[in-house]
Every structure is written in structure tokens, then in C-alpha cells.
Amino acid sequence: MVTIKEIAKQAGFSPATVSRLLNGDPTFSVKEETRRKILEVSERLGYEPQDRQFVAMRDVAVLDGITDDEELNNAYYRELRSTLLDTAQQLHVTLSFHSEIAHLIDNANQFDGFIAIGSQLYSYPELKRLHDALPHGVFIDVNPAPDLFDSVQPDLPQTILDALDLAMARGMRRIGLIGGTGRMMGGHEYPEDIRTMAYRNWCERLGLPTEGLLFVGGPVSVDNGRELGERVVETFAGDTSGDLPDCFIVTTDSLAVGVLQSFTKAGIVVPRDVELISINNQSIAQYTSPTLTTFDIDQQALARTALHTLSDSLSYDTDIKQHTLLSTKLVVRDSFTPAEPAK
């Protein structure tokens, strides 16, 4: 059996340093090059502790990509930032926020790893330079470089399927989608949101019509939701007697707020004329008229999982990347009412 003393001898550090690092002392902080050397030697010698705990990090950078977009859209990310801070404090981890990727690269040796939040888009070459400087990182909500960094995301494709299932359980067949333009990143960049892609895929598999029911484009904002709602009104000529779809899935609450405003202005009453299912469960969802039925994204679970994933990456120092999907939960309000469960 490989011992701490053997690892310390070959790595060139004291047994105490090696022991505290490998056994996850949450009060212990070392330079990245020290960590890498000890982990490299321990893995080469085949060392595996009996009980590997949450550890190995004290100072974590946050790549804070919250842009200067609309207030309501940014509210989601500000709440996530606050949740991440609270969760890190509970785990005795210090966070340092950086808005520019170049600044984080220049100061990479100060941190154990990083967590990225926000809607800011980064080019793959930028992310490759970041990986060269700071190889341990976790992106929350997006997965821009799956071969370079770990990610933790809400399972939005499953959420879209869940929303379709809810509508079909009510006997609905004409189920539309309203959403913004996203960006699939990584080695293949193209302007389609993952929710839109999931909607197209599942509707095809479930035999549901999509022609004339897809209203997608523009940023995720209340203003764009209003414009998309106006496109719906124009398409169906304000007809509230049967031409409207049975239901719309709206990809974010901020878009849904704008959609509701346009529908109200045109005399379309939700849920009487058409029902809405949204995603995110931002606080505004409780105060719209009608209040929004929406899928809740558990930000505490996102933050906690991201920190544990980063710790795991640091502890094992492997080239294998983890991409974790977390389920969402329906919060029922007034814009859509699910079918009664079968007795």
C-alpha cells in the first residue's frame, strides 16, 4: 500500500503538506503547482484515500459574465451570484469575482480553480487560453467548451419534454414555443437555443405539429417577449375563437412577461384563450397577471453541485470532464393548470 510518506518523498514536500491536501483539510491552501505535483505523484503511485472528502480548495475565482442587459433578465444571474456566495461561505471557500477573461488569465496562479456564471459569450480560443492558465473550471447554466471544462446545468431538454407532456395530458395538440435566440457553443457554434432544439426534436418524435407554432428570435428580455407576442397576435389576427394554439411554452419568465403584455393589449386572455407554461420561476412570476405556471430552477443545487464538481476536479486532476444536468420542478399558478392525476 502506498503511504503518505512515500508520496511526500517523491513529490518533494513534507508529509504534513501531502496529508492535508489529499485528505481534504478545508483550512489548507497551497499553490496550484504544488497541488498538481502532489496529485501527479499520488496517482502515479496508485494512492487512493479511504474517504475522499469535499476539499482541496480555498480560493476560487468567479468568471462573472453578467452583461448590462435588461434588469429582469439579469435578475436571474444576480440571484445565482448571491446563492453562489452563500454556498461558498458555508464551505469555507473564498470567491473572487472577475468580469474579464483576460484578467482572470493574468491572475490564474492566485486561484485553485474558477466557476463561471452569466450570459457572456466567449470564443473557443479564449477558453483554450483560460484552460492553459487555469485548467480546473465549472460553467453554470451553459456548456461552452465541453472538452475543456466541467459544467452544471438545468436539464432544459427534459423540461421542454415535461412541458409537452403536461399539455398533451390535457388533450392539447397545438403546442407552440416562444423563445429567444441562443447559441450552441463548443466546437460547433450556431444560433439556436437548446430549448428550441429540444422542442423541434420532441415534437417530431411525438407527432406534434410545429408549422406556424414556433416564434423564436432576439434576446432574452421583456421587450423582445413583447415583440414576439405581437408576432403571435399578427399571425393569428387576434382571433380568440379557435385559431390560437392550445398552449405556448415560453422559454424564460422574462420573455413571458412581455408576451403577456402583448396578449393583454390585443385582448387575448390567458388562460381562457391560450395557456402559457414558462421556465425559470423568477420572483416576477408571482406578480404577473395571470401569475405564471413555470418550471423552477434550483439555484442552490446549481451552486452546490458546481462547487463540489470543482473540488472533485481538483482532487482527481483528470482529463475526463463532468457535465451534470439537474432536474427542474413545476410550480403551478394561473397561466396553466395541469390535468388532475388519475385515481
Image (cartoon, rainbow, N blue to C red):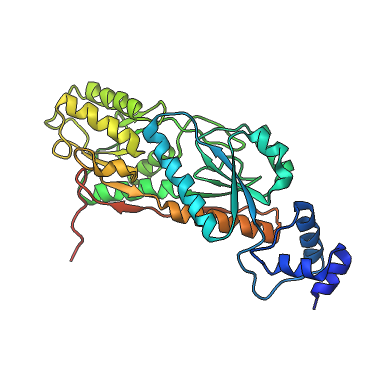
x, y percent for residue 116: 57, 43
Residue occupying the point 62% across, 68% down? 53
Name the side, left or right, on which 272 lies relative to 118: left
Q: Is residue 306 above or below residue 142?
A: below
Q: How many marks?
A: 0
Name the side, left or right, on which 263 lies relative to 124: left
Q: Is residue 42 above or below residue 267?
A: below
x, y percent for residue 320: 66, 54
Give residue 241's quadrant in the image.
top left
Residue occupying the point 22% across, 35% down? 245
Q: Is residue 198 above or below residue 100?
A: below
Give residue 209's quadrant in the image.
top left
x, y percent for residue 322: 59, 54
x, y percent for residue 330: 31, 52
Name the side, left or right, on which 107 lies relative to 228: right
Residue occupying the point 25% across, 48% down? 168
Most extreme residue toward the bottom is: 1
Front residue of 311/267: it is 311
